[in-house]
Amino acid sequence: MSQARSTLRPMSTTFDRLARVDGSARFAFGTIRLHSPVKFALTRLAGDTAALASVSGPIEVRIAAENPSAATLEVLHRPLSGIPGTQSKVLAGGIRSALLPALILTQNPRTLVQLVVQSLSTTGGTQDALVAACINAGSLALLNAGSVPMRGVVCAVAVGRSKDGTMFLDPDEADVLDASGCFAFMFERGEDDARCVWSSWRATSGMPVAGAGIGEGDLKSMRRLALVGAREVWKHVRGVFAGSEDDEDDGMEE
């Protein structure tokens, strides 16, 4: 097996303060923002993978979706263009499964927590990198809202494997892969306290996963590599909120 590549693209996070929601966040792998002569315009370079998430709740829930013992978590995904279809429903289900272990929903029974995730890119990286960006944007939006108790922070990264066995963290379109996936880890008390709460793995060569030669050893290696990347995402999240707190403190001192 060739040596693994264990670096992520640069990460960026912004809080857009969207109207009529309790919290929102934009997360990207590889986004580079440039000044544009057009007001409010954003110049995006190839290679970025980004998502925008917003959180509303706890709010009133439909009777049909009401849970007497806990809040109901609803996740909706919107593609960059067009209307949501089957792929968006599958992606929303994955995002929900990844984030659910971090949420304490029993404190707000008979209510709804709605998370809406918008893909902001169709190119740059891989589909699994977009899934990771969506999960990270969702985590950041929940933290920004602060309206739902959380037991930890979920951080996700994409991992790929080439035909010669080389493993790639955060693979891009230039990497020729025979298998790829996304792993999400929950951090409760720090970067050394993490557990995998969700993963998705598939062959990209058109053959079934078993035919791609993905054994238990490969998955363990991929999980270890993914944890390296997830820790970097965790450090990024910590830095983002540490910076936000510093900005608020500076604003209070006149």
Image (cartoon, rainbow, N blue to C red):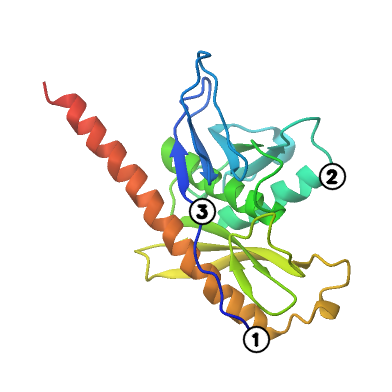
**Left or right: where does residue 141 sit relative to residue 215?**
left
The reply to whether discs 2 and 1 touch (Cβ–Cβ < 8 Å) is no
Residue at coordinates 40% horizontally, 62% vertically from top-left? 188
The circle on residue 86 is: 2
Q: Quadrant of the N terminus?
A: bottom right
Residue 21, given in percent of the width and then of the height, sits at 52, 26
Q: Specify the farthest residue to the right.
A: 207
Q: Position of residue 13 (x, y in %)?
A: 45, 40
- Figure quadrant of residue 119: top right
Residue at (50, 15) in percent of width and height = 37
Task: State the CA–CA distance, disc 1 to disc 3.
Answer: 26 Å
The answer to whether residue 14 is above or below residue 86 is above
Q: Residue at x 68, y 56 (%)?
A: 128
- At 12% from the left and 26% from the top, the residue drawn is 253
Task: Write down the quadrant of residue 215 in the picture.
Answer: bottom right
Is the residue marked by circle 1 packed among few (<14), some (14-19), or many (20+) residues within 10 Å? few
Disc ID at residue 227: none
Of pointers 1 and 3, the one earlier in the residue sequence: 3
Amino acid type, label 3: Arg
The disc placed on residue 217 is 1
For label 1, the SS is helix
- Disc marking residue 9: 3
